[in-house]
Amino acid sequence: MRIRIPATTANLGCGFDSFGMALGYYNYLDFEEASKASVQIVGHGAKHLPVNAQNLILRAAQAVYDSTNSGSAMLSIIAHNNIPLSRGMGSSSAAIVGGLYAANHVLGQPLSKDKLLLLATEIEGHADNVAPALLGGFIVIVHEGNEQRVKRLALPPSLKSVLAVPDFTVSTKRARFILPQKVMLTDAVYNLSHAAFMVLSLAEGDLHGFGEMLKDRLHQVHRLKLIPGGGAVAQAAQAAGALGCAISGSGPTMIAFYEGEKEQGIAIGEAMRSAFALERIQADIMLVSPDNIGTLVV
Ligand code: HSE
């Protein structure tokens, strides 16, 4: 059996820890029941990710077995990792969602998607990558005490993204550690109004309105210190015609959006690549459409 799990981008500027979006770029997981648990990794992380019980895919699979009292997860898994690691593109969420989904499939789907999402959030610590990886589309997550509410909007196919993936990593842990615990009321209101405007723009299909809201005063200003050239990359994308640009998740990847022909995306990508190059940073450019499906058996 093979499933595919999309990459994701979280935050989208103003929606820190609240917004996520699935991207049409995928990891694949081949799995079958076996006499013992095993995982083999192909692609990113093949040389250094653990393949014992510490492996994130196996841990997630075991969480499904545990919550259904099904014993040990005896799965043989081959993970085809296309999503780069520690770049803000949801690689760990893809591993978690993949493991959960595979285990649930093997057990005959005892757990609902809501339950899978709760397990995924428990393992990942925040839901803004795992939710779009599982469900696809644009996701808003609200936490109320121990409760988690999720709303989803399908993304218009005309919305396209350009990712500039630099050749260095930033751990989410570090990118969270540097954030101040208190914010100015004016900055909170700035993000609040931008976030609301972004969702309404998407709901109306107003992609310019969406792009203009890819701004933030809560986290990006601090995180750009970990991304040399990141601010210039955003300006370059905008100057080349992007609807807007933000740090993807906790970075260091920068994501810009555009509407229209591929040539436009290529021009935006070149501008982003050149801006990183001024800091002597090499970046891979990826042109990616949104994903409205989420994790899927293929
Ligand atoms: N919302 C999380 C953060 C996403 O920005 O730290 C991590 O990918």
Image (cartoon, rainbow, N blue to C red):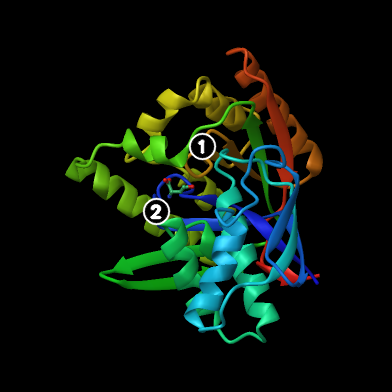
Residue type, mark 2 in image: Asp
Q: Which label number is shown at residue 189? A: none
Residue type, mark 1 in image: Gly
Kindly indicate the quadrant of the structure image that contains residue 222: top left
Give the quarter of the figure containing the C terminus.
bottom right
Q: Is residue 273 left or right of residue 173?
A: right
How far apart marks 1 and 2 lie (CA) works out to 13 Å
Instruction: State which tag comes first along the sequence, 1 or 2.
Output: 2
Q: Is residue 193 left or right of residue 275?
A: left
Q: Is residue 20 above or below residue 224?
A: below
Q: Is mark 2 within 8 Å of ligand 1?
A: yes
Residue drawn at (40%, 35%), measured in percent from left and top? 174
Look at mark 2 in the image and give the residue it sits on: 17
Considering depth in this image, is 197 or 131 the residue closer to the camera? 131
Q: Is residue 85 left or right of residue 66?
A: right
Q: Residues within 10 Å of mark 1 (few under 14, many from 20)?
A: many
In the rendered image, residue 296, in percent from the top left (x then y), is placed at 72, 71
Q: Secondary structure at mark 2?
A: loop
Residue drawn at (62%, 38%), measured in percent from left and top? 242
Give the quarter of the figure containing the N terminus.
bottom right
Q: Residues within 10 Å of mark 2 (few under 14, many from 20)?
A: some
Considering depth in this image, is 40 or 86 the residue closer to the camera? 40
Q: Is residue 228 above or below residue 4?
A: above
Q: Is mark 1 within 8 Å of ligand 1?
A: no
Q: Is residue 248 left or right of residue 103?
A: left
Residue drawn at (58%, 87%), measured in percent from left and top? 110
Q: Which label number is shown at residue 251? A: 1
In the rendered image, residue 54, in percent from the top left (x then y), is placed at 55, 53
Considering depth in this image, is 257 or 60 the residue closer to the camera? 60
Residue drawn at (54%, 75%), measured in percent from left and top? 64
In the rendered image, residue 69, in percent from the top left (x then y), is placed at 51, 84
